[in-house]
Amino acid sequence: GHAVAGDPPDPRVHLAQAEPARPGVRAPFVEERLADFALGLRHADLPREIVDGVKRLLVDTLACAFGALGAPPARIAEETFRKTFGGEPAASVIGGKLPISAEGATLVNGILARYLDLNDIYVGRDPNHPSECIPAALAVAEETGAGGRELIEAIVVGYEAQLAIVDAISFSDRGFHSLSCAGFAVPLMAGKLWGLTRAQIIDAVGVAGPRQMTLLAMNRGPISMIKAMAYANTAMDSLFATRMAAAGFTGAVDSMSWFAENVKGKRPDLPFSIGGGTFRLPKVGLKRFPLQFELQTVAEAGVNLHEQVRARLKDVEEIIVETYPTTIERTADPSRYRPATKETADHSLPVCMALALTEGNVTIQHFEDGRWRADDILALARKVKAKVSDRLVAADPRGRGAVVTVRFGDGRSAESSVEIADGDPRRPMARASLEGKFLQYAAPALGEARAREALALIDRLDTLSSVRDLMKALR
């Protein structure tokens, strides 16, 4: 185990590291395996691919956060947190001036990173945006003065824990959102950075995890600000839970298995695996457009068609989008043709298709300035018909491709097919594109020189003696 010498034995934890378990000795709980993975992970043992991958993900996540500066959810959350909780000003708000507590930074920066729906994506049994764990890691690393290598370790722990959980269990199958895994992952990162013992980390997971189940209802119907706040709030609370565990507060035991067994879904098994020298982090994709992940190929196909159709938009008779059943279910139901909020519009297949064809791109500005609700966009959106593509489904049952056909009144048509989105792990976003994404959103807040300085600091993250150097550059 990883207990510190002199720690009293935990009567609830019986170590059973051998696989398979010996007769009469139980196998470790999921929470115990997570704690052992977190404590055993060392930067020196990480492949270069993983270290470089963390840097890419950090650049992307910070780009998303800078792009959302001034967004109402983050502003409201920061003002409310400062008035209600206060706390030791030990961490930075991205793009801000005044420090805040680690919990406050986790909340506000987490909202910023998620708000635009431009952050990363992984699809296991459920889709998940694992970069939502990064603000918590940054806040605790800054609070403690941890080095860049320790931050890299914490981010890898957060990613691998979340992705192992969403590979093992479908929360949505049980009526919950996959971000529920935050309560099990964030305490691992915080506990590792704070130097907690194995028993304390297990307790932290046992305090945070069972209380952080988020209903899938938050994504049904018109989508509200809660989409950007749900993980961030859970992460904030998980830091507090970890502080409680460090002070001796005990938590529930084996709650993940209980959830799998008692909250019934179509697949009640829990095939959990983590570690062993294999990593899920390289399978995480990035986003080119600030849209729901299944709409990336739809938007790209529309952008590809823009030059062909821009002069003939008034002659469009119908727009056929052939894609996957789940994409249609999530993004093309009747409410998506009449979005009432920005959060619903960026989850709307017809609106995003209309923007892509008309504008030749789909950007943050289109949603922030209300272009998405313009009469011409909504009129064109009403001509969109989504249908299941038998060909795409047969070729890749778990794919997210799209075939778009624009038909004109004179019988002519134009077509574009995108089977793998730009930024998908199978079609990685170019380094120049990723840095351009960061500079586009960070430079207006920091200035070009400071933004490039931040990129350089991330590039040499594993040589930084303190994460505070990076966070100073982001203020």
Image: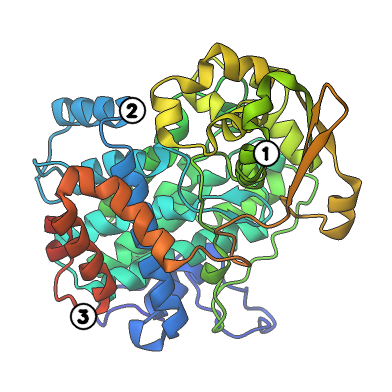
Does any portion of residue 237 appear in the rendered image?
A: no
**Where's residue 466, x and y in %?**
14, 70
Q: What residue lies at 51% left-to-right and 22% top-to-bottom?
A: 372
**Where's residue 12, x and y in %?**
46, 64
**Where's residue 226, x and y in %?**
44, 28
Instruction: Say above or below: 196 vs 316.
Output: below
Q: What residue lies at 58% left-to-right and 57% top-to-bottom?
A: 422
Work out whether residue 304 or residue 176 is closer to the camera in this orientation and state it.
304
Label 2 Cα neighbours within 10 Å, binned few <14 / some 14-19 / many ≥20: some
Q: Do the residues labelled 1 and 2 touch (CB within 8 Å)?
A: no
Question: Along the polypeptide, which appears first: circle 2 or circle 3?
Answer: 2
Q: Which amino acid does label 3 sit on?
A: Thr
Q: Which amino acid does label 1 sit on?
A: Gln
Mark 2 and mark 3: Cα distance apart in space = 35 Å
Mark 1 and mark 2: Cα distance apart in space = 38 Å
Q: Name the residue under label 1.
A: 308
Q: Residue 73 carries which label?
A: 2
**Where's residue 452, x and y in %?**
21, 62
Label 3 Cα neighbours within 10 Å, binned few <14 / some 14-19 / many ≥20: few
Does any portion of residue 255 appear in the rendered image?
A: yes
